[in-house]
């Protein structure tokens, strides 16, 4: 499996020099599984660049799109997803059961609402819901996919991808200690032993009292989850810094973090690992080592060490 981040920002796209460090596009990732069609996770604004790359590559466009939920920052990029406008392209939609409905509803419904000039039916690509890609579990070739509900307004799901004893978990827009049907113990079980955990960390711990119930987590709670679950590598995403520059180290800056067992080490209290810039690659190979161009924050964003992760393969 190889994972690429095409959008790492929460709530709204924020292009500009102040957000180059962690990327300005909203959530979109692409998971490549050997021998399988590409698996796109969410359709935030990051999907636009991904779509351009896909259409420029040779060969047929056969894509799987898994949605976590239907909030705008995970959905609206689909309006500008080039494969949807490509004759002969095929897009299978799965994940959140209302994913197909959400994608359809952002296009013009011929009601004269004026929101977008194209109707869903005008799209030349074949875009269909795939009932075989639904919770609670399904397969993507050799990869078994498990799902879990999110503590998030209007709901949503996260994914655990397992192959040959290795696991990658993607949980964004999730409030670990918030109101909702699931508790930290539930998420610890879902993430147990994962090689890589990618989790929402939209807020700082000191912001949480004012944001309780908004459906997002702070980085300290996520680090605690990663430790409890014995996660090998933690990557934080869904960044949000209204009105300010990205702070902290960018990929490639600072001092590399000492490698632990398996070359990666475990998260420690105060660590904050960030999904770096858009279009960074995370490549869990069939072996035990993983790599990502991430950052390590120790002691909070004003007291930083950083390291650039090199992609590793076994
Ligand atoms: Zn959301």
Image (tube, rainbow, N blue to C red):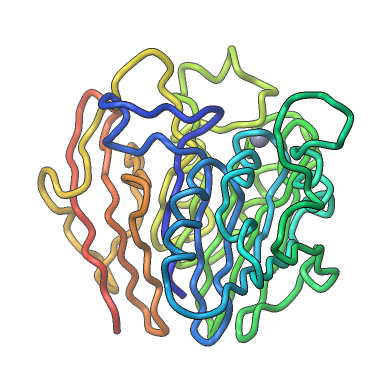
Identify which residue is drawn at 75% across, 29% down: 179
Identify which residue is drawn at 66% across, 33% down: 72
Q: Position of residue 235 (x, y in %)?
A: 41, 50
Residue 271 lies, with reference to residue 310, above or below; the image says: above
Residue 297 sits in which quadrant?
top left
Identify which residue is drawn at 36% across, 53% down: 279
Residue 262 sits in which quadrant?
bottom left
Residue 279 lies, with reference to residue 204, above or below; the image says: below
Q: Position of residue 173 (x, y in %)?
A: 62, 38
Identify which residue is drawn at 42% across, 72% down: 57
Residue 77 lies, with reference to residue 37, above or below; the image says: above
Q: Position of residue 249 (x, y in %)?
A: 20, 37
Residue 120 lies, with reference to residue 153, above or below; the image says: below
Q: Is residue 172 left or right of residue 266?
A: right
Q: Is residue 13 left or right of residue 277?
A: right
Work out which quarter of the rendered image holds the C terminus and state it: bottom left
Q: Position of residue 196 (x, y in %)?
A: 45, 62
Q: Tell which of 51 and 182 is nearer to you.
A: 51
Q: Tell which of 66 and 142 is nearer to you.
A: 66
């Amino acid at each position: 499996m190889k994972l690429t981040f095409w959008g790492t920002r929460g709530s709204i796209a924020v292009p500009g020099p102040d957000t180059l460090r962690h990327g300005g596009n909203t959530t979109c990732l692409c998971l490549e599984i050997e021998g399988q069609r590409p698996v796109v996770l969410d359709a935030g604004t990051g999907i636009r660049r991904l779509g351009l790359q896909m259409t420029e590559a040779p060969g047929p466009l056969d894509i799987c799109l898994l949605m976590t939920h239907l909030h705008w920052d995970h959905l609206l990029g689909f309006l500008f997803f080039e494969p949807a406008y490509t004759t002969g392209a095929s897009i299978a939609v799965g994940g959140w059961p209302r994913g197909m409905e959400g994608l359809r509803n952002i296009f013009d419904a011929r009601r004269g609402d004026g929101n977008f000039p194209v109707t869903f039916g005008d799209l030349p690509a074949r875009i269909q819901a795939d009932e075989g890609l639904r919770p609670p579990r399904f397969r993507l070739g050799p990869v078994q996919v498990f799902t879990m509900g999110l503590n998030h307004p209007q709901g949503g799901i996260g994914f655990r991808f397992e192959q040959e004893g290795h696991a990658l978990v993607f949980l964004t827009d999730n409030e670990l200690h918030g109101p909702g049907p699931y508790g930290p113990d539930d998420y610890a079980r879902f993430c147990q032993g994962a090689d890589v955990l990618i989790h929402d960390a939209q807020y700082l711990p000191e912001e949480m009292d004012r944001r309780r119930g908004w459906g997002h987590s702070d980085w300290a709670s996520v680090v605690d989850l990663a430790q409890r679950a014995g996660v090998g590598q933690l990557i934080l995403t869904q960044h949000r810094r209204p009105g300010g520059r990205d702070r902290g180290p960018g990929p490639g800056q600072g001092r590399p973090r000492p490698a632990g067992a398996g070359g990666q080490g475990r998260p420690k209290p105060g660590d904050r690992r960030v999904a770096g810039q858009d279009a960074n690659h995370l490549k869990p190979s069939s072996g035990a080592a993983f790599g990502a161009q991430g950052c390590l924050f120790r002691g909070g964003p004003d007291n930083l060490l950083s390291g650039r992760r090199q992609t590793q393969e076994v």
